[in-house]
Image (cartoon, coloured by chain):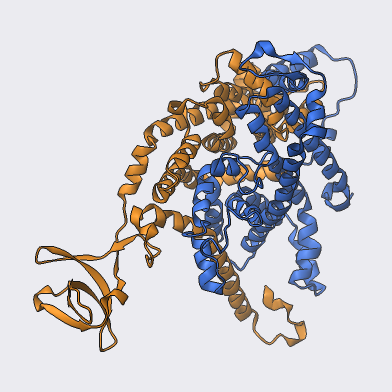
Chain colours: A orange, B blue
Amino acid sequence: MAAEKTPKAAVIVPKKVRTFFNTIAITGLALSVLFLFMVPMVYGIMTALKTDSQFSKIGAPWWPASEGKFNYEGKDYDIYSVPMEDGEIRQLALVVKGRAVSSFVDPENPEAGLIEWEGVWRQLERAWEPDPQWANFTKAWNTINFPMLLRNTAMYAIITTFGAVLSASLVAYGFARFRIPGKNILFMLMLSTVILPGAVTLIPTYFVFLKLGWVGTWLPLIVPAFFSWGTNVFLLRQFFLTIPRELDEAAMIDGAGPFRIFFSIILPQSVPALTAVGLFHFFYAWNDFFGPLIYLAGNPDKFPITVGLTAFNNLYSQSTNLIQAASLLSAVIPIIVFFMAQRVFMQGIVVTGVEK
Amino acid sequence: MSLSAFLQRDKAPKAQMTNMQKKEARWGLVFLTPWIIGFLLFYLAPMIASFVFSLYDFNPAVPDQARFIGFENWQRALTVDDEVWLSFVRTLHFAAISLPIGLGFSLFLAILLNSKNVIGKNLFRTLFYMPTMIPVVAVVLIWAGVLNEQTGWINVLIERLTGIKAIGTQGLRWLADPKLVYYAYTMFGLWGVGNAMIIFLAGLQGVPTELYEAAEMDGANWLQRLWKITFPMITPVVFYQLVLGVIGSLQYFLAPFVLNRGTGFPEGMTRFYMVYFYRQSFSFFNMGYGATLAWIMFIVALVITIVLFGTAKYWVYYASEEK
């Protein structure tokens, strides 16, 4: 669109050509922004695959690599990038180190024997070979006890998602279909809880859970999910309002009670919205940090991934590669779920964000 | 549907309720029960209790020694303890940097991807959204790596592209330099712009195309249309994002805690209000004082929200209220 800035009178370029160049320019801009946006991701992957020693070596490449070695007649020799007389740079293994003349062997053609090279070998650069350490992921997986963290997180996410969807749909049905005195005030009150800072209710809640003996267990994190959250109720209510009332009324004439209508008409009609709310809650739970941090402090065997990862970072802050590997591992499941369900998910975001 | 429209929707005339209506209201309350109980148990009662706690010197390890001290905690927080004010100023300082950049970036992405000249719109949208799915703890750790002053790629890229000395202790110490650390934290946040981007995108798609067509006929250029049509039409979305963003900033906690356990490194710059609240309440277990800090946060959030809503009528455009 940028080209349209030129005054109308000066337009000689046909519209099709203009559109073509605009497309290239704008798509190119989007691509370059995306490239910068993804730099940390590529960094994370590359770093996760590096050996421990690559970080401290000067001249090491940005990709996972180790210094090349070649086994020649039963001994390992270091491979260097050697500039030859004809200007070519060859990757050769240094066999005999000399002050002014050294002997190399070509790893691709060792039968040719030693190659004499004049020059100071200390000034040569090492040749690096790709050497991705896939085992780092296994190592991170075991060190952090990933199966346990994953089990804890999945259990937490699944149970609370069930509770959140069930309770929010009941409440949303109440708000969408029944005339209740003072309903508007209750609805406003519910929306305002969405922006209430959690800290203001935290301390007494913590104290009560402490008295109940629930601190150190999952209960303080799971139980509140069964009492519905404002955002979820709002989203579901908006959706229920779009379901034609005639369906309810027809069922009512057939003698169905409110619960029957809820389960056999409203819920089956609302699968996309229920999925969206379920996904929201699932990702929220997967990402939750503050609650588990407070309620599970000192119980590492109950930690979810987020808190476990933080503890791991504190213990292994020197192992950059393992930290990156563990971070990436923690993202795998949410990203897979997202790719499978992104359409429903994004529609849900739009409903909560635009209509409020 | 806007809230005001909702409020006018079913205002029933005030009359004696019939039996049918009573029955309906009772059934409705049955369905609202989970929320009503949750509201009383997890919002209303704790809020009141929190205020009561703020009047006590209270440590849950020795609950028997709790004693009533009136408004001493409040006095301490508001007049004696400088850290309360300092951490609040830091929080606002950080919000003043991170919110405009974050909102600006998500709006920029939305405008870019809303352009009819982009090929592969859905793919771009998915890829820009994807990092929002990564747990924030992992996001912070990945970014802390890429911003590392010695080995991080950001400094390497800057140095290679511009020639400015960026790598090393004399270079750009993103996480250790008090002048840079808020920008570093802001960058972590850019990986979470997905939701805002999608909402902005939906807002942009909701702008009637006739407006653009009419403006184009009148000879308005791209920039004029952006400024005069697009921006005003999406101010409701900006407003919603701004309110959520400000409230979220007040509770900013995760990155400073994950990276330096809330010590405030560097030079106390990252000891934000929520971090200070956490330390008082859950490191030192000064829960009476913690409750006071929480209540102060609540009051501040309330005041900011009210002020934002008060300014809304000067800059937020609501189509339905024009008529």
Residue B44 x, y percent position in the rendering: 74, 21
The x, y position of residue B30, in whole percent, is 69, 16
- Determine the residue positioned at 77% across, 71% down: B216
Residue A183 appears anywhere in the view:
no
Q: Dividing the image into 4 quarters, which one contains the N terminus of chain B? A: top right
Q: Is residue A14 above or below residue B291?
A: below
| Figure check: A265 above or below B203 | above
* Left or right for A246, reference A105: right
- Single out the residue that lies furthest toward the bottom: A86
Most foreground residue, B278 or B124: B278
Rendered location of residue B257, percent (x, y): 58, 40
Residue B43 seen from this side: yes
Task: State whether residue A227 is above or below residue A194.
Answer: above
Residue at point 79% right, 41% down? Answer: B2
**Left or right: B145 with respect to B42?**
left
Q: Which quarter of the picture shows residue B35? A: top right
> Of B18 and A223, which appears nearest the observer?
A223
Residue drawn at the location 55% of the way across and 24% of the way down: A222
Q: Residue at x 77, y 18 (%)?
A: B52
- Among the 4 quarters of the image, the one containing residue B104: bottom right
Outermost residue on the front side: it is A99
